[in-house]
Amino acid sequence: MLGTALAQAAPSAQPEVPGAKRLGDFLIRPTQNSLYGPGPHYTIMFRSQEYWPFGVNVVKGVRPIKAQHEGQPMLLAITSRADSVGTLLVSVQNGTPLSRLLSPLQDENFPDWGVPQPGREDLLLFAESGLALDTRTGEVLWFDTAVKGSGYRVVGTLMSVSPDNKVAAYLRFKEILVAGREDGLVAAYKLPADANVGELADIFKSAYAQAAQAIKDGVPHVNNHRQARDMQIAWFAQRFHWQAKNDTWELIGRGLGPALPLSER
């Protein structure tokens, strides 16, 4: 399992404070702590005790998802730069809150809440970690990008997950790779030339231009890399899609040829 489930609890008899939000047996309390820089900051309480996911006693944000476990809501939590953890999924197991790392912290000013996959708004893509989260069930989807017969794992950016959640597409320079849940890479496609040197290049140029303009307009903390990633996911959904074939799903789209033998990539 990616990440470590770590819970630290400390008794607390403090009453609810203004701005606190109750989510099942969780209480999300605003807190003032100058050690963590500009706010807002929150403390997660569970049944009158402080809950410290991964030893973190203050978080930058908390959001519930649709899924529940043991009758309690499952939460997304973002840690602060001071703790350098990232996006966590919090769920109650055997009466105790546990956490799993979904995405490592990259930019505190632009926390990674996941990008809803176009057409599947309940599925959040965490492109940097290559994980996806089904917010209806709380299932974390991990895909094996290992090249079969070797210990080598391919690094790519998660773009899309098939309708049955069994395979996912990763974008790399000049290619698209499809990985399964357990059996490594299952397909490779050559990225159409007009996509690589044309449309994708335009996306990065546009993201940079928008970020530069935002800075000129006085908007602080603009992350053009995160913006380009979100634009890539939207572009990918417009150009490519999944098609059922022989009890599985294959990727098709404009300019995309048949899958190449993995030995030829």
Image: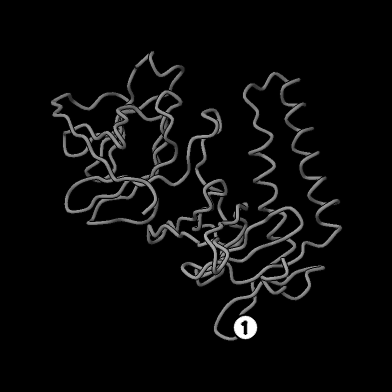
Q: Residue at x 27, y 56 (%)?
A: 69
Quadrant of the snapshot with the C terminus: bottom right
Residue 26 horizontal/vertical position (percent) = 25, 40
Residue 91 horizontal/vertical position (percent) = 29, 49
Please determine whether, in this image, residue 27 is positioned above or below residue 141.
Answer: above
Residue 240 lies in quadrant = bottom right
Residue 176 horizontal/vertical position (percent) = 69, 62
Looking at the image, residue 212 sits to the left or right of residue 10; the answer is right
Residue that badge 1 annotates? 245
Please state which of residues 128 and 203 is positioned toward the viewer in this rendering.
128
Residue 58 lies in quadrant = top left
Callout 1 amino acid: Lys
Looking at the image, residue 259 sits to the left or right of residue 38; the answer is right
State the residue lying farthest toward the front.
150
Please determine whether, in this image, residue 28 is positioned above or below residue 216.
Answer: below
Q: Residue at x 49, y 56 (%)?
A: 132
Callout 1 secondary element: strand
Looking at the image, residue 215 sits to the left or right of residue 126; the answer is right
Quadrant of the snapshot with the N terminus: bottom left
Q: Residue at x 65, y 76 (%)?
A: 243
Q: Residue at x 17, y 33 (%)?
A: 49
Residue 244 horizontal/vertical position (percent) = 61, 80
Mark 1 is surrounded, within 10 Å at the Cα level, by few (under 14), some (14 to 19) or many (20 or more) other residues, namely few
